[in-house]
Amino acid sequence: MSSAETPTTPRGPVDSSRIPRYAGPATYARLPRLDEVGGKTDVAVVGVPFDTGVSYRPGARFGGNAIREASRLLRPYNPAQDASPFALAQVADAGDIAANPFNINEAVETIEAAADDLLGSGARMMTLGGDHTIALPLLRSVAKKHGPVALLHFDAHLDTWDTYFGAEYTHGTPFRRAVEEGILDTEALSHVGTRGPLYGKQDLTDDEKMGFGIVTSADIYRRGADEVADQLRQRIGDRPLYISIDIDCLDPAHAPGTGTPEAGGMTSRELLEILRGLASCNLVSADVVEVAPAYDHAEITAVAASHTAYELTTIMSRQIAEARVPRQAVSER
């Protein structure tokens, strides 16, 4: 049975009026585990505790659980999108994909295989990283189901470099590999929130040749979230869309807990508003990566990441519910 045909009422979060938010296991948004909903879900929130691909500060392997802890305060109704995402579709915490921390190639294969299983069950994926290396196997899996996908990449950095120390799979190379492998729709690729020094101007030249457009953090500051969201919607059209969010797209004032911070980034408010402006796009899966809690304080970064995942999950849940309505109407005739 596909996710669009699921007839049962979704099982939602633990009732915080009966069990305090700080009590009990820290699943994302206090949602049920995948095994508690019979192994079937519309949106699978899954962690990938892997950070062997980082080039500077490690620690993103602990990001998924930090985001889960910070998500305890999320509530069932999202007023910004006028939706109750956990009532519209079944959302469940699918636990973690355990990848080899000593062998990047093997880890990439493991993540891809696990993603194949989740997507093959009819679910969309909301992945909590982990470093940005994991975007490549996730995109490979998504492309098997949807063909080459549009990509919105929120990040301080391009992540389209060729290699680091001769290594092809790192957190700075996933999108070059994805372009080379033909799993991205090169008519609809955008970086959002980029800033900071580069190795040279050739970085931008190479990136442009791959098909990427760039919206810098300064562009967002000058033009505003609504205009930027409109530009991105036009570029994406109705293509299947994957959104990959490195939390370092935010300024270190909003996300200090990350591995490669850069000054001059977006505010968390700007990020959330841009995502809300993409609600009409065909979002097939997404990730939030590079949360490194060892450098965080007062859960600032993890809170921002948990709310970011909440907006993305809401978009997917709304679209799943909207797709289900016509089928139900037809079956009732």
Image (spheres, rainbow, N blue to C red):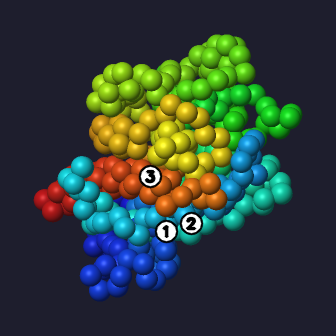
Specify the amino acid type for callout 3.
Ala
- Disc 2 crowd rating (10 Å Cα; few below 14, some 14-19, many 20+) is many
Element on which disc 2 rests:
helix
Query: In the image, what residue occupies the spot 30% across and 66% down?
Result: 75
Who comes first in sequence, dot 1 or dot 3? 1
> Residue at the left extreme?
333
Q: Residues within 10 Å of mark 1 (few under 14, many from 20)?
A: many
Q: From the viewer's side, name the closer residue of 204 and 184.
A: 204
> Looking at the picture, how far across and down is residue 95, in whole percent?
56, 69
Q: Are marks 2 and 1 in contact (CB under 8 Å)?
A: yes
Checking the image for residue 304, the label placed there is 3
Relative to 213, is 45 above or below?
A: below
Residue position for label 2: 65
Judge from the rendering whether residue 82 lies leftward or rightward of residue 296; answer left or right: left
Provide residue 221's location: percent of width, then percent of height: 38, 26
Q: What type is the residue that disc 2 sits on?
A: Asn
Residue 195, compared with residue 202, is above or below; it is: below
Q: Residue at x 48, y 72 (%)?
A: 27
Which residue is labeled 1 in the image? 69
Describe residue 21's horizontal placement relative to residue 45 as left or right.
Answer: left
Please, is residue 2 above or below residue 246 in the view?
below
Identify residue type, mark 1.
Glu
For residue 174, what is the image quadrant?
Answer: top right
Q: Position of residue 90 (x, y in %)?
A: 36, 66
How far across and how far down the image is residue 252, in percent? 53, 42
Name the disc covering residue 296, or none. none
